[in-house]
Image: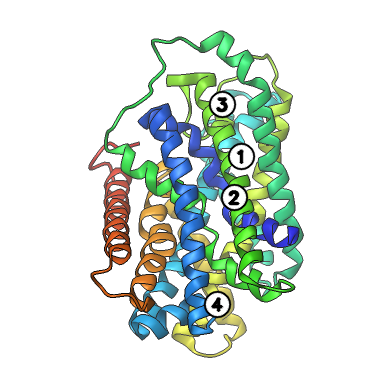
Amino acid sequence: MRGSIFALMATAIGAGVLSLPYVVKQSGLIVGIINLVGGSLISYTSMRLLTWACWRTKCWNYAKLISDTFGWFHGKILSWVIMIWTLGSTVPYNIIISQTFPDILKSFGVSADIADADSTKYIQVIVMNLLLLPICLMRDLSAMASFNFMGIIAIAYFVVLIAAETPMYMNKFFTNDDLVMIDLNLSTFTGFAIAIFAYTCHTNLFAVRLELNRPIKRRLNKIFHRAVFYEMCMYLTISVGGYLSLLHRTPKIIIQRESILDNDWLMVVGQIAMIFNLMTCIPTSVHPWRREIYVSFLKRTSKPWEHFLITAGGMTGTAIIATAYPNVISAFGLLGGFCAVPIVVVYPGYIFVKLSRKSWTHPRKLILIVITTIRSLIGLIAAVLSTLDLFGVVKVS
C-alpha cells in the first residue's frame, strides 16, 4: 500500500509546487490556503467518484470509461487532454531550468553578464535537449521509474529547507504592513487552476488499482486519503513558509528567491537536484503523448524515422515555446485550466451524475451538477486568462 501511495504522490508532485508561494502572494495568505485545502478535497472526492464509476461499469481505463459513458467523442477529448497535459508539462520544466541555471552559474563564480545573457540561455536549452534526446527516443522508460523517487526527495528537501529558513527570513523581511491576507483579483482564478494542477494524479490511479493486492474499496480510499493528505502538508509548508519568508519579494519560482547569506550552498544543492529532477521528468512526459499520437493517428507501431521526427519535433516545439514565452505562472495556469480541471473536476463530477440511478431532481445530483459546473467555469476562465497573459494581452501573473 505504501508503494501505491508513493506512486500517486510521484504523479502529482512536480514543478508546480515551486510556484505555490507566488500563487499565495498573488491572492493573499487566506485565499492561498483555501485554494490548497480545497484542491485537496476536490482531488480526493474526484478520485472516489472515478473509482465508484469503475466499480459500477467494471472498466478500469480512464479514456475507455469516459468513452463508454459519454460516447467515443468524449473519450477522444480526454485522450487529447491527457496528451496535451503531458506534452505541455515539459514547457514549464524548460522554463524553470533555463531560469534557475544562471543562478547556479553565478554561485560558482560566473559573472552576471555571462550567466544572465540570452545566448547562455539558448545554449543551455539546446544542449540540455540534445542530451535528453537519446533518452526520450527510448520506447521503454521503465528504467526511469527509480528517478521518480529522487524527484520526491528533491521536493521534500526543499520543503524542509524552506521550513527551516523561514524564521531567519521573516526576521529580516517580515512586516505586518506587507502581509496580505485576502486579495481577490484575476490571479485568483489561475490560483485555483494551479492548485488543481498540483493535485492531479488521476491518470495513474487505474494502474495503482491493478497493481494493488486486495484492491477493495476501503484500501483504495485509504490510499487516496493518505496520498492527498501528504501532498497537502507539503504544499502548505512550502507555500505558506515561502510566502511569509519574503512577502511581496516572493519570486515566481521559490528556488530563485534572493539569498540573505553570502553563499547559500544548501539552496544551490537543492537547485542542482531540482534541475536534475526536471530533466528526468521530460523523458517520462514525452512517452505518453507520443504513444497517443501513435494510437490516434498512425494506428500502428511507428517506423524508426517517424519515431525520431515525432520525438524531436515535440521536444523542439516545447523548447521554442518555453524560450519565446517564459512565463511559468501562465504556463501552469493554462495547463491547470485546460487539462487538470477536465481530468480532476469535469469528468469525475459528471460521470457520477450520468451513472447514478437517482433521479435527476435528487438534491445530491443537483448539488453536484451546480458545483461541478461552477468549478469547470472557473477553470475555463483561468485557462483563458493565462493564455491572454502569456501573449501580453492581460496582466495576471
Give the Cα separation between the discs numbered 3 and 2: 18 Å
Q: Which residue is drawn at 27% across and 41% down?
A: 392
The amino acid sitting under disc 2 is: Ile
Residue 13: mark in rendering: 2
Residues under numbered marks 1 and 2 in contact, where contact means CB atoms less than 8 Å apart: yes
On the image, which quarter does residue 146 sit in? Answer: bottom right
Q: Residues within 10 Å of mark 4 (few under 14, many from 20)?
A: some
Give the Cα separation between the discs numbered 4 and 1: 32 Å
Q: What element carries label 4?
A: helix
The amino acid sitting under disc 1 is: Met
Estimate the x, y position of residue 130 in percent, counting from the top left.
Answer: 63, 58
Say which residue label 4 marks. Answer: 291
Say which residue label 1 marks. Answer: 234
Instruction: State the quadrant of the C terminus.
Output: top left
Say which residue label 3 marks. Answer: 241
Mark 4 or 3, which is nearer the eye? 3
